[in-house]
Image (spheres, helix red, strand yellow):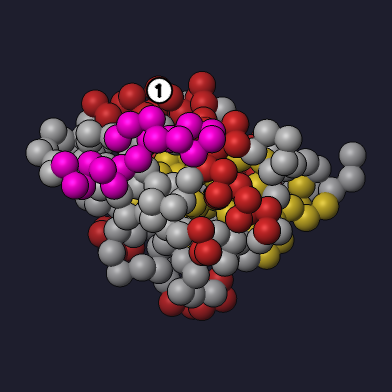
Amino acid sequence: MGLRRFRADLHIHSCLSPCGELTNYPRRIVRRALEAGLDIIAISDHNTAENAAAALQAAEGTGMTVLPGMELTSEEEVHILGVFKSMDDIRPVQDEVFRNLPEVPTKKAFVQDQVVVNKDDEVMGFSPRCLLAATRLDVHEIVALIHRFGGLAIASHIDKGAFSIISQLGFIPSDIELDALEVSPLMTIAEARTAIPMNASIPLVRFSDAHRPEDIGRTSTDFLLAAPSFEEIRMALRSKNGRKVCSS
């Protein structure tokens, strides 16, 4: 099977993330991703995957590959992207995250910014949890949890001054087995390699961290793959069988 480039943006927030725009519904996300020339996207809301299934269903028949994801927050307030093959893989991770989210009172107005929808963008309800809160899991436990259920663990926006592994810990621990490091749209890969101390063997990727429809695909990563799938991306991040990260 021949290899070709596929363009991916694996860090997209839906209307379920309290910091995401309420217009970022699944069908609109898929439509905007197609317009942006993307082949693969992941829905990565804060500490939840409740809108991921709707996005997968919204993409059926469009040619867009949608992967379920989640941006988990460690107790140190480090953001880690977890990207998974299927909803069956991510659901137990979500359950564990929910068990480890603190029960803090949330204002009704805040909850109404955490919208759970179906594939037709119809409002099904609101998440009552404080999704922006830090979990009681440390960063090592977060990465281990993602890997336990077959996911990819990617340190989010390592160049940012808040909620990154660098900003919160001051360094990237050598005993954390990250699958990739994400550089935000604020910095190029070349700039990140110069500015940030890191293990050169960990691949660097760039995604949009989109909170609005217009930001989807503003930054993406090209992968050389045989097909637009989770397993192919895993191989690319490990530089196996000719698969690789091409550009970001």
Q: Quadrant of the N terminus?
A: top right
Q: Is residue 225 left or right of residue 60?
A: right
Residue 132 or 127: which is nearer the viewer?
127
The boundaries of the magenta stretch are: 108-126
Q: Position of residue 147 (x, y in %)?
A: 47, 33
Disc 1 crowd rating (10 Å Cα; few below 14, some 14-19, many 20+) is: some
Residue 174 visible somewhere in the drawing: no
Does 110 appear in magenta?
Answer: yes
Direction right: furthest residue? 1
Identified at 11% across, 38% down, the residue is: 104
| Element type where label 1 sits in the image | helix
Residue 139, image x, y percentages: 31, 44
**Residue 196 horizontal/vertical position (percent):** 42, 71
Residue at x 16% of width, y 42% of height: 108
Residue at point 44%, 47% (across, down)? 14
Left or right: 214 as drawn, with respect to 243: left
Is residue 116 within the magenta segment?
yes
Q: Depth check: 109 or 226 in front?
A: 109
Residue 117 visible in the displayed image: yes
Q: Position of residue 128 (x, y in %)?
A: 22, 34
109 left or right of 200 in image: left
Front one among 67 and 21: 21
Position of the C terminus, as image quadrant, is: bottom right
Task: In the rendered view, tell whether residue 88 sits above or below residue 169.
Answer: above
| 205 versus 121 height, above or below | below
Residue 93 against residue 20 in the figure, above or below: above
Residue where numbered disc 1 is placed: 92
Q: Amino acid at mark 1?
A: Pro
Residue 150 as seen in the image, left or right of residue 243: left
